[in-house]
Amino acid sequence: MDIVLIILVILIIVVGLFFKDFKSVVYFLGIIEIFFRLIHKIASLIGIKEFSSFITKYIPSSLEGIINNYSSGILNTVLIWILVLLFIYFEWYLINYWIKKKK
């Protein structure tokens, strides 16, 4: 599971450097969160034991799961609050996009 953290951090850095925009990093984190949850939901709905165990073993259930796996105590609380704030920004960007699209 350590590789997941390394890959995630590298991807966040690449997205930040490539797009040079905080909004892109927030969108990326939202996309990753939705992807993790979607994969786990599909695995549970398909019901194939080997596939479900593979997904459970190698793909984290959410970004919060990654944070909880690699931190504890006050650092964990701070990182979870940062994640919540990033999701609030993500929601704000989505709502703004939706409102602008309606006009």
Image (spheres, rainbow, N blue to C red):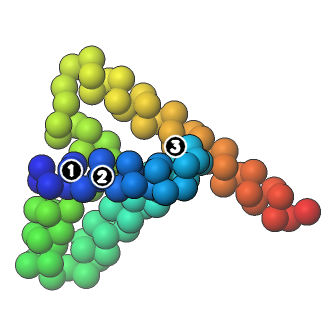
Q: Position of residue 82 (x, y in %)?
A: 43, 31
Front-most of 18 and 5? 18
Q: Along the polypeptide, which appears first: circle 3 or circle 1?
A: 1
Residue 72: % across, % down: 19, 26
The image shows a total of numbered marks equal to 3
Image point (22%, 49%), residue name: 5
The Cα atoms of the two marked residues, 1 and 2, are separated by: 6 Å
Q: Report the amino acid beneath label 1.
A: Ile
Give the labeled residue for mark 3. 87
Q: Amino acid at mark 2?
A: Ile
User: Is residue 82 toward the left or the right of residue 79 in the image?
Assistant: right
Relative to 22, say whether 18 is above or below.
below
The percent coordinates of residue 55 (x first, y second) are 18, 68
Which disc, if any, is residue 10? 2
The quarter of the image holding the C terminus is bottom right
Distance from the alpha carbon under mark 2 to that under mark 3:
20 Å
